[in-house]
Amino acid sequence: MNHQQPRLSIGMPVYNAEQYIIEAIDAILAQTYTDFELIISDNASSDRTQEICQAYAAKDRRIKYYRNDRNIGVHRNYRRAFQLATGEYFRWATHDDICAPQGIEKCVEVLDRNPDVVLCYTKTKLINEHGTILEQNYDENPLLTNSPHAHIRFRNLIIDSFSRRYRGQQLFGVMRHSVAATTPLLGDYSGGDKPFLARMTLLGKYYEVPEYLFFNREHSQRSSSKEMNSPYLRMRLFNPDTKGEKPVFPRWSVFLDYLSAIKDVPLSLSERIRCYLVLGTWLGKNKNWEQLVKELIKASVWSIYFSKHRQMLVQQHQAEIPSS
């Protein structure tokens, strides 16, 4: 490195990550692109995460370890890692995924060459606990998020991409810090990464490196595991202080943040109208409008019919739950 401030900041929000974090940090340290800082934001882990991270930080000055006094929730910890960043470019990294050695370098090269690209990521493969590539994997449909038209990028992301399983890995690409800093980042609810990615694609193009250089790990402890299907249990990932006493509206939160993105981002009148029309199409796709109605119905009857059930679910999961 020829200057004190790194060009790239890598933010790694972690919580009880001892099982995979060594492999994840080693993969980052093995990158062919070396002008980076690795910011680890520990969400008050109770396992060996702190010990492991401090040992790495003592050996490599590019690694900076921060520990929260308490678990502040998944997306708040993601935001904290971003806020601690100093680089021109930024990338979120998880404690259980793996980036191939050339992955970051290729993304930085794209951003350096293309000022209209705000986020660059590589193709992804799904792996298991042992690092073996799984047979069931990411869809191969091409993305159009490099279109010069904002409404096409917006549609391709929220309708064509997010409707498929194992999508949204663009979140772990390399992005322009200055552009991401103009957004609210990730909302404190399940799916809060989707409006962020949608807003980013309204602000500029995405670029997908056509090589499989990112490996997303599927395992039982990840926060998207089946036991987290209850929206009330999942809400505790984003707000650990909640006791489940209030109804949650994850689909409404996504919808309203999509609306806010279209309203806030500087677009031409014609592009703004087209984006609103895309959002209208989104309402009719995958029964999104039905989910919005169901959330309202559940909220209206929750205190009467589901109070005991809710309390039971929360009590069953008072032990530590997957988080970052």
Image: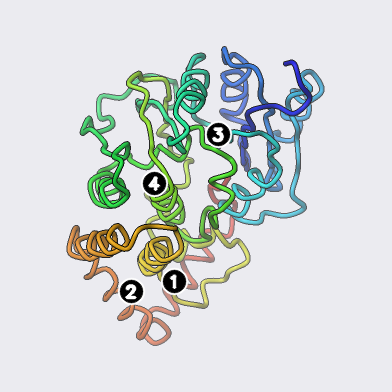
Q: Earlier in the sequence, mark 3 or mark 2?
A: 3
Is there a contact, CB below 8 Å, between mark 1 and mark 2? Answer: yes
Label 4 sits on what residue type?
Thr
Q: Earlier in the sequence, mark 1 or mark 2?
A: 1
Q: Position of residue 320 (x, y in %)?
A: 59, 51
Q: Earlier in the sequence, mark 4 or mark 3?
A: 3
Q: Position of residue 60 (x, y in %)?
A: 76, 19
Dot 2: few (<14), some (14–19), or many (≥20) neighbours within 10 Å?
A: some
Label 3 sits on what residue type?
Ala
Indicate which disc residue 93 carries: 3
The reply, left or right, for residue 233 in relation to residue 76 is left
Q: In 3D space, how far apart are the residues under numbered discs 2 and 4 (Cα atoms)? A: 28 Å
Is there a contact, CB below 8 Å, between mark 4 and mark 3? Answer: no
Q: Which residue is disc 1 drawn over? A: 248
Query: In front: mark 3 or mark 2?
Result: 3
Q: In 3D space, how far apart are the residues under numbered discs 4 and 3 (Cα atoms)? A: 20 Å
